[in-house]
Image (cartoon, grey):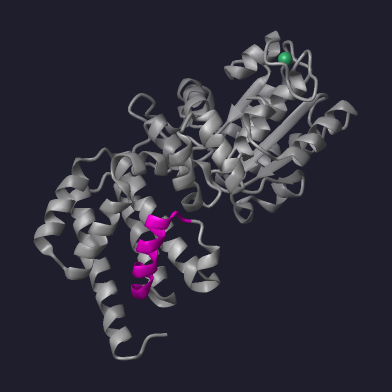
């Protein structure tokens, strides 16, 4: 990963580069950013830059260090991330990061903007909760006590330190505060309020904001080869979240906004026959597509609220989708939008945990239908707020 692989963030990159060039390398940083932001990728690009043998304003991409960093196989690059037991590794004490480096490298390569559910999927954790277990405290100390093999800096990257067992966190406090020479901790977190204060106080915080729409478009078109037109369509719905944008690209391809519109109409009419048919079709999609379709629904809800609160001139949608949102917004208010959001999120959660997709979709449809209907009645009787 190089800085140029991440669109935008020029001033942050510049600050990082000049700090390294002038020898100011903090020994522990916390890269804080929401899901779909480049917190992990920027940390990786930074680590690559730290160790590149011919750096300019970015890592060179061709030296032996860059080669190994690019494949996440450098012997002085250590990873710790949440894990769970799997079919292959059934003992909790053995299910540690070192045992899962192969799927982890695959994850970094294919889904560097993925979330915990994506990783759990790659790991084969099924429905189990992923955490950073107590053993990792010892493993971190052990890995860092070894002499550096070949790099300028030894790097310990901890993904999602908020999921760290308290004893594991306590075990590393001392080394986090005073690591061996030329050792750098890069903690990559999403929720600062869940990071232990003792960890937080020992790190330098780097806020990684979400992508802007323009950066997101550039990422899609230039780095993911998404056609320009499709990128323009999905970027406004993704709210700066690249993971979401990529999943929307697939949805737009396979299902389209029209399908969503028709579904909402059937929910509203409580057309049971049509809803059963739609549930069947939904159940035939693969799980990622099912989730992406529901995520699309959440994006539409968000955009509907934006239009209500800020007015249509703030809408970021294309004309066709905007027209739908305009009509849809008659059925949406402050009270029911939260309820709808929770229902959609809950269904995504259930599908991630292998719920029967047809049943989950049908149940969601009926609840959505009731909510839309009751809003329409309130609208007619003038109780609308
Ligand atoms: Zn290099």
Q: Which residues are magenta?
A: 317-331
Name the side, left or right, on which 144 lies relative to 254. right
Name the side, left or right, on which 69 lies relative to 302. right
Chief secondary structure of the magenta portion: helix
Q: Nearer the viewer, residue 196 or 193?
A: 193
Residue appearing at x 66%, y 24% in the figure: 142
Q: Nearer the viewer, residue 334 or 257?
A: 257
Q: Residue furthest right?
A: 22
Q: Residue furthest front?
A: 319
Residue appearing at x 83%, y 24% in the figure: 181
As for residue 326 lying within the magenta part, the answer is yes
Q: Quadrant of the C terminus?
A: bottom left
Q: Nearer the viewer, residue 136 or 82?
A: 82
Q: Residue furthest bottom?
A: 382
39 lies above or below 105: below
Name the side, left or right, on which 54 lies relative to 253. right
Q: Pinpoint residue 15: horizontal percent, then vertical percent.
A: 82, 37
Q: Quadrant of the N terminus?
A: top right
As for residue 150 lying within the magenta part, the answer is no
Q: Pinpoint residue 339: horizontal percent, then vertical percent.
A: 37, 69
Q: Nearer the viewer, residue 265 or 62?
A: 265
344 lies above or below 173: below
Q: Pinpoint residue 297: horizontal percent, then vertical percent.
A: 36, 56
Residue appearing at x 65%, y 51% in the figure: 196
The reply to whether residue 169 is visible in this rendering is: yes
Count of number-bearing discs: 0
Q: Quadrant of residue 13?
A: top right
The reply to whether residue 130 is visible in this rendering is: no
């Amino acid at each position: 990963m190089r800085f140029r692989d991440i669109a935008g963030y020029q001033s942050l990159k510049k600050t990082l580069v000049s700090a390294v060039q002038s020898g100011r390398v903090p020994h522990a940083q916390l890269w804080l950013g929401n899901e779909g932001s480049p917190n992990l990728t920027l940390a990786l690009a930074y680590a690559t830059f730290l160790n590149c043998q011919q750096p300019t304003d970015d890592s060179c991409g061709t030296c032996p260090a860059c080669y190994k960093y690019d494949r996440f196989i450098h012997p002085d690059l250590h990873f710790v991330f949440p894990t769970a037991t799997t079919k292959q590794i059934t003992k909790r004490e053995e299910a540690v990061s070192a045992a899962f480096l192969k799927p982890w490298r695959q994850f970094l390569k294919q889904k560097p903007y993925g979330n915990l559910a994506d990783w759990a999927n790659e790991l084969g954790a099924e429905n189990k909760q992923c955490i950073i277990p107590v053993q990792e405290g010892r493993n971190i100390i052990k890995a860092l006590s070894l002499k550096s093999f070949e790099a300028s800096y030894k790097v310990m990257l901890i993904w999602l330190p908020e999921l760290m067992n308290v004893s594991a966190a306590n075990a590393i406090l001392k080394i986090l505060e005073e690591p061996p020479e030329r050792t750098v901790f890069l903690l990559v977190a999403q929720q600062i309020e869940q990071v232990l204060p003792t960890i937080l106080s020992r790190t330098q915080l780097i806020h990684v904001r979400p992508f802007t729409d323009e950066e997101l478009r550039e990422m899609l078109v230039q780095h993911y080869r998404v056609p320009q037109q499709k990128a323009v369509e999905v970027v406004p719905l993704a709210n700066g979240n690249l993971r979401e944008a990529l999943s929307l690209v697939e949805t737009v391809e396979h299902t389209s906004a029209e399908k969503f519109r028709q579904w909402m109409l059937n929910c509203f009419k409580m057309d049971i026959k049509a809803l059963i048919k739609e549930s069947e079709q939904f159940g035939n999609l693969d799980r990622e597509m099912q989730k992406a379709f529901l995520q699309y629904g959440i994006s539409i809800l968000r955009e509907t609220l934006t239009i209500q609160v800020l007015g249509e001139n703030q809408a970021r949608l294309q004309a066709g989708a905007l027209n739908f949102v305009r009509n849809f917004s008659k059925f949406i208010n402050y009270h029911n939008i939260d309820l709808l959001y929770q229902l959609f999120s809950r269904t995504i959660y259930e599908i991630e945990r292998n719920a029967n997709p047809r049943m989950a979709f049908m149940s969601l449809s009926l609840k959505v239908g009731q909510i839309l209907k009751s809003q329409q009645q309130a609208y007619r009787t003038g109780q609308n707020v």
